[in-house]
Every structure is written in structure tokens, then in C-alpha cells.
Amino acid sequence: MYVPAHFSADDAEVAELLAGCDTADLVTGTPRGLLATYLPVLYDPAVGEHGAMLAHVARNNDQWREPASGESLFIVHGPDAYVSPSWYASKAEHGRVVPTWNYLTAHVYGRLVVHDDPAWVESMVRRLTDRHEHGRDPSWSVDDAPPAFVAGQLRAIVGLELVISRIEAKAKMSQNRPEADRAGVVEGYRAQGDTAMAEAVRTAPPEVSGPRNGSRTG
């Protein structure tokens, strides 16, 4: 990933992104070429030195059967949004402005482990369900379904675990713009109701001369 120093994400941003991510794109290099699947995921920081990404795929999805050559990759997406040049104070000053896009993303690399094991898959599915059902009223539990039905559903999926070896992350949040332009971007997002992006731009550190992080290697 191309990560200029002023757009590199620090460890705290990466940890928050992974802990809060619900889905990611799994990309593997195989003898058939690149294969990719969009999956619900869980980040488990307790696995190995850098944690692991946990997921499951349909048994009929060939990606889990194809041997992955080298590292595999989960692409994790954070908040993102268009930036209008009309928000910049510098538009009125000289007009030399163009549209762009702000975003937070991480490329999470590691060794892909396949878990064709009903016990592992059930544990992962329960954790995933509990995460998304927490706080709902009423909520749903795996145990609400008939055991035989659950067993059949579990046989139809296969577990995946990406043991993380390195992470490349990029937080492009208008850090390269003058302070007045950044303030305009914050107000622009607020005006259209995108409070998440407004806060992300407001709290992003301004451009610095040296690298913050951007790549973590194990």
C-alpha cells in the first residue's frame, strides 16, 4: 500500500479499526490466480504476536480449498467519504483545489489457517453472533435454533483464521491541507450529517515531517 508519512495510521488507530471492523475482503493468491471473498470477521488480539482475523466461508466456496501461496490478505475498510473543493477556504483565495477522498483502511497480512472442524466453527459463530446481538431487545442466540438445524448449518461452512504477520494502514483525513481547509472539511461533513467523518478529520494529527507508523511487521 502506498502510504505517505502524513497519512500513516498509528497503532492506536489500527487497533481501534480492527476491534470495530465487522467485515473485510479476504484475498488469497492461488494456482488459479487471485481469489477474493467479502466476509464477516472478528479480530482476536490474543492470537500470536499481532492477533488474528477470524471468519468463515460457505463450504461450496472454493477459496478455502485452494492452497494459498505466501501471505494472504484481509482488506479492512474504515469510514470514507468524498471531499468537495467547495469546502476549502483556499478555494476562495486562489481556486487551485480539486476533489479528493478521505478514508481509513488497513491491509492485514498473514498465514491463512483453514479450520474444517465443527467445534472451532461453532465457537467462532457463537462469538460472532454474540457480538452483533449484544444489546438487542429481543436478541437471538444460536441456542434459540433446534440443535439438529444448527449442526446442519455448521456443516455447510468452514472456519478461517488469518494469523497476522504485518499490517499496513492508511488514514487519509485531510492532514495535508491547511488548517482553514481542514476546518471547512469538518463543517462540510457535519452539514451533510456525516458526524463520523467530521470527527475523524477533526481529530487527525496535522501533517508531520517524519513517519508516524503505517506499517507494522512481525
Image: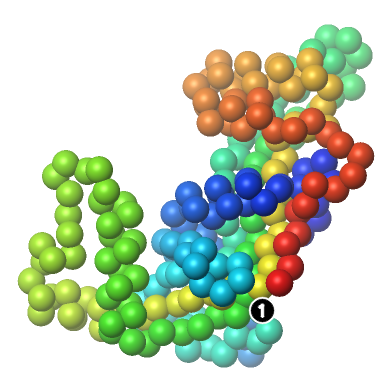
Image quarter hosting the C terminus = bottom right
Dividing the picture into quadrants, the one containing residue 108 is: bottom right
Percent of width and height locating residue 155: 26, 83
Instruction: Say above or below: 125 vs 178.
Output: below
Dividing the picture into quadrants, the one containing residue 7 is: top right
Instruction: Say above or below: 100 vs 167.
Output: above
Q: Secondary structure at mark 1?
A: loop
* Residue hosting label 1: 71
Residue beneath the point at 57% across and 56% down: 76
Compared across the picture, whether 189 is left or right of 216 comes to left
Compared across the picture, whether 183 is left or right of 3 comes to left
Dividing the picture into quadrants, the one containing residue 117 is: bottom left
Residue beneath the point at 83% across and 34% down: 207
Label 1: few (<14), some or many (≥20) within 10 Å? some
Image quarter hosting the N terminus = bottom right
Question: Looking at the image, which is closer to me, 170 or 211?
Answer: 211
Percent of width and height locating residue 151: 18, 80
Percent of width and height locating residue 175: 78, 32
Compared across the picture, whether 194 is left or right of 102 comes to left
Badge 1 amino acid: Glu
Residue beneath the point at 67% across and 51% down: 11
Question: Looking at the image, which is closer to me, 127 or 180?
Answer: 127
* Residue 12 shows in this picture: yes
Residue beneath the point at 68% across and 84% down: 70
> What coloring was used for the rendering?
rainbow
Instruction: Say above or below: 59 vs 201.
Output: below
Percent of width and height locating residue 46: 49, 67
* Residue 37 shows in this picture: no
Query: Residue at the left extreme?
Result: 146
